[in-house]
Image (cartoon, grey):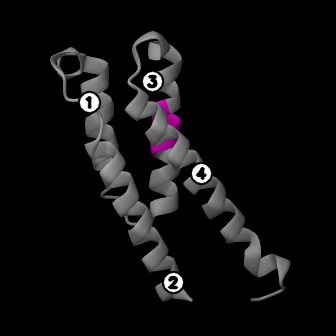
Amino acid sequence: MGGLNMDRGHKDRNEIVALIAKLPKTQKFREDPDFKALCLYLKSELQEDYMPVAINNMSKRISSYLMTHSYSSPKELVNLQKELLKLNTKQNSLRHLPFLFNIY
């Protein structure tokens, strides 16, 4: 069972890396200190060993950014947030499966 979780986390990590790579690199965003800080934070979270924690942390940070920068947020960031929320929901439901089936 442990191998399955590792594979799942690895697959999620690859999806997230691909989505982060799609974030805009235009001058407007390269010069925005908040956006630069967010991108650095997202990349540092990818170093986290346990992906569900990293996914949750990244999702929270993006939510904060979107609340304060909604007028200028790139659609790629919104897409990343949607994917993180889907992965977070999936991770949370998988976490409870053993208890639903009384597997200890």
The quarter of the picture where the C terminus appears is bottom right
Mark 2 to mark 4 CA distance (whole Å): 19 Å
Q: Badge 1: how crowded within 10 Å, few (<14), some, or many (20+)?
A: some
Mark 1 to mark 3 CA distance (whole Å): 15 Å
- The residues colored magenta run 58-62
Q: Could you tell me which residue is drawn at 24 percent across and 27 percent down? A: 36
Disc 2 residue type? Leu
Q: Which of the 4 image quadrants contains residue 80?
A: top left
Circle 1 sits on which residue? 24
Relative to 84, is 30 on the left or the right?
left
Q: State the image coordinates of residue 52 (x, y, percent, origin top left).
A: 52, 60
Circle 2 sits on which residue? 4
Q: Which mark is residue 86?
A: 4
**Are the residues flagged by discs 2 and 1 in contact, CB closer than 8 Å?**
no
Marks 1 and 3, the one that precedes in the sequence: 1
Q: State the image coordinates of residue 23 (x, y, percent, origin top left).
A: 30, 35
Would you place residue 56 above or below residue 7 in this image? Answer: above
Q: Nearer the viewer, mark 2 or mark 4?
A: 4
Disc 1 residue type? Pro
Marks 1 and 4, the one that precedes in the sequence: 1
**Are the residues flagged by discs 1 and 3 in contact, CB closer than 8 Å?**
no
Q: Nearer the viewer, mark 1 or mark 3?
A: 1
Circle 3 sits on which residue? 65
Marks 3 and 2, the one that precedes in the sequence: 2
